[in-house]
Image (cartoon, rainbow, N blue to C red):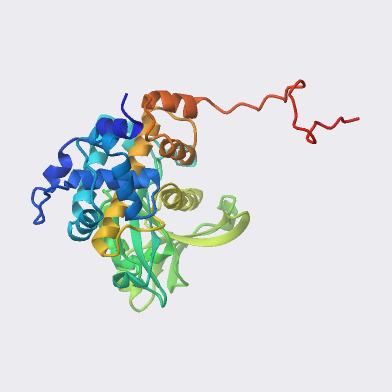
Amino acid sequence: MIPILAQIVQRYLPGHKIEELAAGEKIKAREFSYSAQAYLLMLGQLAHVFSLNELVDLSTIFSGELRRIRGIEAVKLTTFSHANRTRSPGVMRRFFWLVYGMFAREDPAFANPRHKGALAKFRMRGIYAVDSTTIQLAYWCIKWAKHRQRKAAVKLHMVANVANMLPRFAVVGKASEHDSRREEELFASLLPGDVGVLDRAYNNFPVLYRQTLRGVFFVIREKEPTKYRVVKRVARKDLPKGIVSDETIRLAGTTTKADYPRTLRRVKALVEVKGEMREMVFYTNNFEWSASTVAGLYKARWAVELLFKQLKQTLQLQSFFGENQNAVEWQIWAAMLTHLVLRYIKWKNKVVSSYTRFAAIIKNTIWLKRSLEAVISFYCIVPSQSRPPPDETMPYLPGFERLAIA
């Protein structure tokens, strides 16, 4: 029986595809292949190692087991570091989307599941949350990513499907770059009829207007009070519970009226945030949905924040194996691929445990020589049961005997 790690790679990742994607690269692989680099970086994510030294030592200690995974050999520190620094991370990015497409073809319900709850009515539309997260780096050695006075960071921009918390599109940029500068690129991944849900950092009216012309719907939070005139207003008595106002408006600012020359819908709603009700204002280019639906769609945006939280909690994005931009992006895309594969395995095996617990179980069993299905069945699928009462005849250590209760 081969280890769990080998089963994951050989069953769920297409062989030789990485080398095909790297065929056009200027930097050729000699002793250390692009495949070995990608799989070892995924090992770093699964084992949650904190340095390249530790990952190299791991490849040496388990060299016999790794050799069974498509011939991965132990690697020297200088060789691995040079590969991360000089090779294009575009290879790993393209491999991620290739694997995503393969999963989508084999199991369409995995990549495009039905929406649940209040969003179940959107059967024929994709709902995508657009947001970004900042990943902190070490300032003293990564000056290209300088962010604020004494920090360095990169920003991961993502378009995530709120139904399955999987990325539809992702791009890595500098943290100092404003979110709105990536907005056009992120929206380009949406198709006519899709719904994009965005936070106020992406409030860019020229870009939003172009999406309206494309037939893409959006719900976005108001960034700051904007000049407008009311064209139509829903009577207060007709407003559903939790809705303060529902208006059709035209922007009236010096530049905004030219940036978005059509009418917009402005909905003010009471939204629960951390147990407290807060007033929030949303803009949308859809005039058919109920005002409650508009507010509900914005709540769905929080799914991408949960995705970012899971990425940071279950993968190795706290410390990086290299200091230059290529090395950082290689590691981020390796983390994204690891997350994708784990989510697919969880979905494929109908695991009822949370994703966080499932990822922790895989992390602690990667070298176990047992069937992957057996491990999942034993640790993940059996629903939790109430703990049985203590045995009355159970022996106790001296001084810790069970106290008699009158």
Q: Observer-nearest residue: 127 or 99?
A: 99
Q: Is residue 22 above or below residue 346?
A: below
Q: Quadrant of residue 79?
A: bottom left
Q: Percent x, y for residue 100? A: 26, 40
Q: Is residue 254 above or below residue 396?
A: below
Q: Percent x, y for residue 358? A: 45, 36
Q: Is residue 199 above or below residue 311?
A: below
Residue at the top extreme? Answer: 393
Q: Is residue 214 above or below residue 126?
A: below
Q: Is residue 368 left or right of residue 70?
A: right
Q: Is residue 16 left or right of residue 340?
A: left
Q: Is residue 216 in view from this perspective?
A: no
Q: Is residue 12 left or right of residue 32?
A: right
Q: Residue at x 29, y 44 (%)?
A: 59
Q: Residue at x 42, y 64 (%)?
A: 200
Q: Is residue 5 left or right of residue 384?
A: left
- Quarter occupied by the C terminus: top right
Q: Residue at x 17, y 43 (%)?
A: 18
Q: Percent x, y for residue 248? A: 43, 61
How many numbered marks appear?
0
Q: Percent x, y for residue 6? A: 29, 33
- Quarter occupied by the N terminus: top left
Q: Is residue 66 in view from this perspective?
A: yes
